[in-house]
Amino acid sequence: ESGLSVMLEKTKGVIQVDKLRAILLMEADFNFYNGLMFAKRMMDRAEERQWIPREIYGGRKNHEAIEVALNRRFLTDISRQRRTPLAIASVDAQTCYDRMAHSIASIAAQGWQVDPSAIVAMLITIQRMKFFLRTAFGDSTTHFSGTPMSPFQGGCQGNKGAPALWLVVSVALVRLMHRLNLISQLRAAMTATAVTFAGFLFVDDTDLVAFSEGAEADVALTIARLQMAVLIWQGGLRASGGALKPKKCSWSIADFKWTQGKWRYSSLKETPGSIDVPNLQGELHTITRLGVSEAVKVVGVHQAMDGNMDAQVN
């Protein structure tokens, strides 16, 4: 029940403690067992029975982060073609693996027919684990750990079962968004097939979407729906032990104005609004709003389509 934390640089040359990534080295047979029970057997069963929502890409075989960017680009193209408001909030979970509450993760895994004894074997070991630290000066001789009244939580980065466990929790959050109708719907032009989705997820990076058409194509309503989606997503994360990191969150909106039969993207002044995210203390922080030139890079709006981007004013 011992683990060795190795601090790695997230960004080359940046060695501040709060900017490093802690990877846990644990007993090889224990790590193999976690990978077998969760990453292999549980995930194979989930894929076979189609338990994973279409919004989730991370932690799955044959899926890559580029798919999120591509689908986000397709969505912004549809918004431009139909001239309907589209708002996207890019929200980042803080140390997602390390903040998972074991009680919630256990319930979610049992819902996917994981043997309770396998769940107990992994989570109890983490709760009782003694964590040693490796630095350039060598391995520490002292350790830190949880207590019987406050056991250690999380899945630990470096644990083969942690990504699958986080995916199970993510699925519960996505289903919550659907249950509360905080979703967007598109209908295929040729087949009339309706596609509903809450956003796009790749591990701890999430793009929440508010897209409206027809009578609901109102920019103020779109922003309000996005704000509600962000608050509910944060609430779900908090209930599962996680939290959003306001400094790494941002949002943007594409809206359209018509002048003598020609359209252009609305300016920031023409689309007032803000999105707030609670911090760990529950205090609301207004997250960064991206301007048009930045939104082009982030949400994939075409820069030179019909020449209208030249008329856009931030």
Image (spheres, helix red, strand yellow):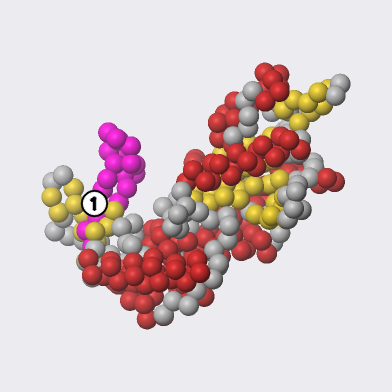
Q: Which amino acid type is marked by label 1?
A: Val
User: Picture coordinates of residue 218 (x, y %)?
Assistant: 79, 41
Left or right: where does residue 255 sit relative to residue 125? Answer: right
> Residue 253 in magenta?
no
- Relative depth, front residue between 87 and 70: 70
Residue 5 shows in the view: yes
Q: Which residue is mark 1?
A: 6
Where disc 1 sits, the SS reads strand
- Relative depth, front residue between 267 and 311: 311
Q: Which quarter of the picture shows residue 235?
A: bottom right
Left or right: where does residue 305 sit relative to residue 202? Answer: right
- Relative depth, front residue between 156 and 264: 264
Q: Residue at x 53, y 52 (%)?
A: 201
Residue 281 shows in the view: no
Q: Residue at x 55, y 67 (%)?
A: 50
Q: Is residue 221 above or below residue 132?
A: above
**Quadrant showing the C terminus:** top right
**Quadrant showing the N terminus:** bottom left
Give the magenta part as a residue range.
3-22
Left or right: where does residue 72 sit relative to residue 183? Answer: left
Q: Is residue 116 above or below residue 3?
A: below
User: Picture coordinates of residue 226 (x, y %)?
Assistant: 67, 47
User: Picture coordinates of residue 52 (x, y %)?
Assistant: 54, 63
> Residue 15 in magenta?
yes
Q: Which quarter of the picture shows residue 264?
A: top right
Neighbourhood count class around disc 1 (C-alpha, 10 Å): few under 14, some 14–19, many 20 upward: some
Q: Residue at x 69, y 28 (%)?
A: 268
Number of numbered discs on residues: 1
User: Picture coordinates of residue 112 (x, y %)?
Assistant: 50, 74
Residue at the extreme front = 190
Q: Residue at x 47, y 52 (%)?
A: 63
